[in-house]
């Protein structure tokens, strides 16, 4: 048994484990510009934080009246993103330390992300996190992305852990809602500080209003340990 008893930890990837949103923004901006939608802003991009890539391109087609098919847009955005992800993705230092603490304590872990399986694999490999995070679920592998609970429930199934024994780390409101719907506790670290008051975050067991700036690996580990005593 691990240091945390029967507990398992499930991580969102983008904006939680790694600072990948700038790469997603650049890939989105390039893809939209190629289809006649220039000037996509960071403020607009923030509205897509926590939404799967597949759902994002579906919204684009409706919002901008794009002629390209959903599969074409998805493939193009993923291609552009992967080119950036393989060389420009940074793991948050305190998150890396937290993963290493959990690994040392033999705590089961998984990644549950709205990114494609290829993107998840590329990011985990590029950052070295793949050494500890061997279970990963993409929104492409379940019927519904966040805020539906499907992806977290599938991660729990693969870990062999009941949902009630899982703790999710999330940076986005749809992810916090998905964790709550899955019956899991959630440590929420809002990527967009202004969204910390969103009602979805109110369901989190631990809400760090300052996001990554407020996260400390040792403190989070102690919080988990105290919760199982």
Image: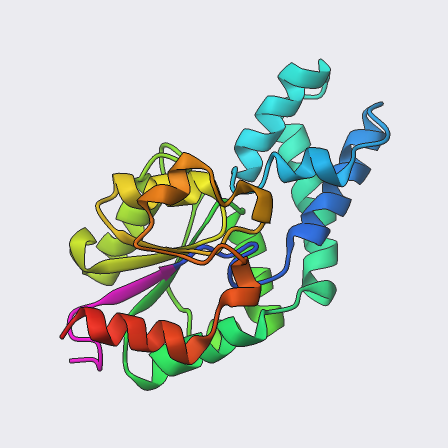
- For this orientation, the residue located farthest to the bottom is 104
Dividing the picture into quadrants, the one containing residue 132 is bottom left
The answer to whether residue 192 is seen in the rendering is no
The answer to whether residue 30 is seen in the rendering is yes
Magenta part, dominant SS: loop
Quadrant location of the N terminus? Answer: bottom left
The reply to whether the magenta stretch includes residue 129 is no
Identify the residue shown where x is 62% and y is 29%.
57
Above or below, 190 relative to 135? above
Q: Using the image as rendered, state which of residue 71 and residue 214 is in the foreground.
A: 214
Identify the residue shown where x is 31% and y is 77%.
222
Query: Is residue 25 toward the left or the right of residue 171 in the image?
Result: right
Above or below, 65 relative to 205? above
Give x and y (percent) for residue 108. 28, 70
Give x and y (percent) for residue 48. 60, 36
Give x and y (percent) for residue 122. 59, 61
Q: Using the image as rendered, state which of residue 119 and residue 8 is in the foreground.
A: 8
Query: Is residue 145 toward the left or the right of residue 160 in the image?
Result: right
Above or below, 54 relative to 153? above
Above or below, 105 relative to 205? below
Identify the residue shown where x is 53% and y is 47%.
115
Give x and y (percent) for residue 184. 25, 51
Q: Using the image as rendered, state which of residue 94 and residue 82 is in the foreground.
A: 94
Q: What is the magenta range? A: 1-10
Q: Using the image as rendered, state which of residue 8 and residue 204 is in the foreground.
A: 204
């Amino acid at each position: 048994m691990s240091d945390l008893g029967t507990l398992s930890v499930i991580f969102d990837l983008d904006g939680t484990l790694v600072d990948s949103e700038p790469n997603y923004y650049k890939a989105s901006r390039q893809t939209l510009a190629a289809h006649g939608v220039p000037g996509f802003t960071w403020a607009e991009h923030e509205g897509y934080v926590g939404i799967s890539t597949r759902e994002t391109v579906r919204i684009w087609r409706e919002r901008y009246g794009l002629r390209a098919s959903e599969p074409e847009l998805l493939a193009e955005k993923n291609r552009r993103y992967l080119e950036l992800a393989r060389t420009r993705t940074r793991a948050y230092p305190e998150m890396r330390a937290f993963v290493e603490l959990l690994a040392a304590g033999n705590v089961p872990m998984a990644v549950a992300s709205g990114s494609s399986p290829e993107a998840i694999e590329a990011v985990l490999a590029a950052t070295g996190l793949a050494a500890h995070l061997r279970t990963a679920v993409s929104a492409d592998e379940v019927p519904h992305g966040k805020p539906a609970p499907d992806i977290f429930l599938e991660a729990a199934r693969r870990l062999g852990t009941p949902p009630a024994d899982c703790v999710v780390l999330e940076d986005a409101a749809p992810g916090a809602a998905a964790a709550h719907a899955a019956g899991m506790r959630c440590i929420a670290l809002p990527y967009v500080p202004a969204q910390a008051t969103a009602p979805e975050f109110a369901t989190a067991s631990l809400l760090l209003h300052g996001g990554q700036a407020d996260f400390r690996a040792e403190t989070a580990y102690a919080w988990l340990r105290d919760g199982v005593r």
